Image (cartoon, grey):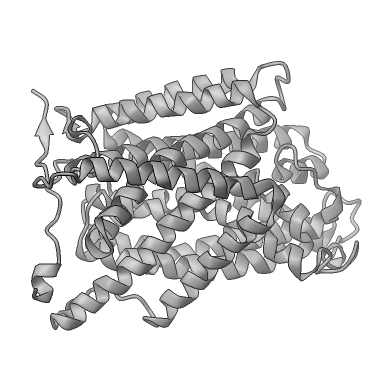
Amino acid sequence: MSAEREMMAYEQEDLKRDLKNRHIQMIAIGGAIGTGLFYGSSWAIKTAGPAIILVYLLAALAIYFVMRALGEMAVEEPVSGSYISYSNRYIHRFAGFLNGWNAFIFLLATSAADLNALGHYVHYWFPHIPIWVTAGAAVSVMFLVNIVGVKVYGEAEFWFSLVKVAAIVAMIAFGVAMIVFGWGNNGQPIGYRNLVDHGGFFAKGVGGTLLAIVMVAFSFGGVENLGLAAGEARDVKTTMPKAVNATFWRLLIFYVGAVAVLLMIFPWTSLTTKGSPFVEVFTKIGIPAAASIMNLVVMMAVLSAVNASVFTNSRTFYNLALQKNAPAFLGVVNARKVPAHAIMMVFAAMFVGVILNYVMPERAFELCSSVTVFALVCAWGSIVISHLNFRKIRIRSGQESSIAYKMPFYPYSNYIALAFIAAVLVCIAILPDMRMSLVVSAVWVAVVYVAYRFYTRSELPVAHPVTES
């Protein structure tokens, strides 16, 4: 078989390309700033101590390589299925099937974790409102935003992300003022002592530092969803490289920078795992209203994550249906070119997350975040492996020189990313509270394989899109 024939044809999508450059840029930022930073950072700091800064730095480099691999393929072959479609083409159909349906368990886990965090933020003002009530209201609003059309989603995500960026920049600026000039600390500069006092920079040892990589990975989860926007971007060859290139610097600023400031202001031992440590920064300044505003911001960060989850998962299920790896009704779009049936399925799945927060509100975040990391590992690993095969095919066909946006340091950057992904898996296996997620994940993979055998018992041609009248 020739290299050209090995390269599979695009799924014939029928989505409206209505996302502008500013939408794509803010979707990229929104994917990089989520619940893992505002809420999960407390857990990561408690696990690693001040050395968590190094973990974020190394993870940012690895994820940048993952995103560059995804960006190269997205520019050459822009489809809403993104890494799911690429793993279907360049690894094996089961890889695409597994990644696609991993999106389902990923959806359940992330939405439950995000909604749990949202409920805790609401408790800052209204401690008596049950978490599940807040969760149900949030899911309903985000469903309406997404069912109207992709442009409405893009606008909502643009403003959510803009608020998040402004808040983090403000927090870093206020923090630097406290560290250097003593603002909010009776005029006494705080300095960097909190990074080395209280047990030293490696207060939890090398072991604790490495184990924190799991929550850091959860924090970065969502950056890969930028590729899903390629299928609805107006000028993917221009917007996608810009968005991917900025990923590394955004991760450095918003994670490494923000967490470093946080750890210089507070002794790491004083940060609690309840609520957001970012709210504590504004409380320390002595302006109660500022703390309330920051709490509102972190709530918007969660709403942004839920909003993005509806968009990305609905496009995932839509693309799966076109691959004949999901029921055909999920591949139907309405008159506005929105995959309405897929959005309804996402809506139903998210309400399972609402129920989970009703049943076990105190354990939902840790359990769901660890299960989420498994889905992330599969997604990131498949991106890197798909890219290796994608580039090999291009090399064999003599088309490598025509690639517009190449992965740097290929193939060594691929191997660095794979090493990071392997380290995350090992750490999940070591951590007692997260080890169970591997068992759950193994059972899930077995279930998906049985479903895969059912769907592929007779090979069918790839479906064409259907539009409702």
Q: Nearer the viewer, residue 417 or 161?
A: 417
- Say left or right for 63 vs 467: right
Q: Does residue 124 appear left or right of residue 152 in this picture?
A: right
* 258 sits left or right of 349 in the view: right
Comparing 281 with 144, the one in front is 144
Q: Position of residue 184 (x, y in %)?
A: 84, 48
Q: What is the x, y in percent for residue 154?
A: 34, 40
Residue 35, quarter of the rendered image: top right
Q: Is residue 387 above or below residue 158?
A: below
Q: Quadrant of residue 238?
A: bottom left
At a point 66% along the width and 35% down the height, the residue shown is 295
Nearest the eye: 62 or 288: 62
On the rendered image, what quadrant is the N terminus found in? bottom left
Q: Is residue 167 visible?
A: no
Quarter of the image where the C terminus is located: top left
Residue shown at the point (35%, 68%) measured from the top left: 385
- Is 59 left or right of 88, judged from the image as shown? right
